[in-house]
């Protein structure tokens, strides 16, 4: 069993589910859920070969609209306490972990000690901040995850580190500015996609140790869709 440390802010999520949404009008909520998000979305991933160690850093409140008809989510966030990755934590990871993952690096105020990491690590992004700010830590990472809708933020980022872009249509792996792999996914309507990117990252890391980069990227795409379908089935039973 591989030990994987998960670093990131503790998200205090309020998720408002709607069947459909009309911007500028009054909309009906189907139901509201309060839960922990961010790194805690990894709890939903069906993994077999990794043991996740949760290291929450700082706190953020999030108000999320989950639109069933379009299978999209929109977030409004409020920072409560800042996050810092200190040397003590990095030393702990270097001694005890096979991998570390940061959700989300652009939400961590002090992350520079990641440059001291000897354990392999991956990064996920959640905002439209300039990626040049994170260039050095991107170079040191083993894998980068991001939404394909933010791909343009990497136009000037030409690094050997594989960057996996994902959306409802599939995944794309980019290295040194070139797409080296694509896998297509058939979109499924009516899914609750909250935390889908985190679930994808969790499954990818689990499969990476056995399958390597490209096979893990594709299998994680397939398994994430299955996990979201299982979630929908369970929600319909409630």
Image (cartoon, rainbow, N blue to C red):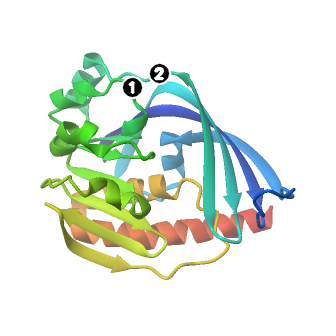
Vertically, is 14 above or below 94? Answer: below
Mark 1 neighbour density, 10 Å: few (under 14) some (14–19) many (20 or more): some
Which part of the image, by quadrant, shows the C terminus? bottom right
Kindly identify which residue carries mark 2: 82
Q: Secondary structure at mark 2?
A: loop
Q: Judge left or right: residue 73 versus residue 154.
A: right
Q: Is the Cβ of the residue at disc 2 closer than 8 Å to that at disc 1?
A: yes
Vertically, is 171 above or below 104? Answer: below
Residue depicted at 42% across the width and 57% down the height: 47
Mark 2 neighbour density, 10 Å: few (under 14) some (14–19) many (20 or more): some
Q: Judge left or right: residue 158 versus residue 226.
A: left
For residue 109, the mark is 1
- Residue 153 in percent (x, y) is at 33, 53
Decide which of 93, 60 is in the foreground and name it.
Answer: 60
Task: State which quadrant residue 111 falls in.
Answer: top left
Decide which of 33, 97 is in the foreground and name it.
Answer: 33
């Amino acid at each position: 069993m591989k030990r994987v440390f998960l670093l990131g802010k503790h998200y205090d999520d309020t998720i408002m589910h709607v069947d459909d949404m009309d911007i500028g009008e009054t909309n009906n909520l189907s139901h509201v859920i309060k839960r922990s998000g961010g790194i805690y979305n990894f709890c939903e991933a069906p993994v077999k070969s990794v043991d996740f160690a949760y290291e929450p850093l700082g706190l953020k409140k999030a108000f999320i609209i989950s639109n069933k008809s379009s299978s999209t989510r929109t977030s409004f966030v409020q920072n409560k306490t800042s996050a810092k990755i200190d040397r003590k934590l990095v030393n702990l990871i270097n001694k005890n972990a096979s991998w570390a993952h940061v959700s989300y690096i652009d939400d961590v105020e002090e992350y520079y000690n990641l440059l001291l990491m000897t354990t392999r690590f991956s990064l996920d992004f959640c905002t439209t901040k300039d990626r040049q700010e994170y260039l050095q830590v991107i170079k040191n990472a083993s894998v980068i995850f991001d939404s394909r809708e933010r791909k343009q933020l990497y136009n000037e980022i030409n690094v050997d580190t594989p960057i996996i872009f994902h959306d409802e249509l599939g995944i794309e792996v980019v290295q040194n500015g070139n797409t080296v792999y694509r896998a297509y996914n058939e979109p499924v309507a009516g899914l609750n996609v909250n935390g889908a990117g985190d679930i994808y990252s969790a499954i990818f890391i689990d499969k990476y140790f056995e399958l390597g980069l490209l096979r893990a990227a594709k299998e994680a795409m397939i398994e994430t869709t299955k996990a979201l379908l299982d979630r929908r089935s369970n929600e319909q039973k409630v």
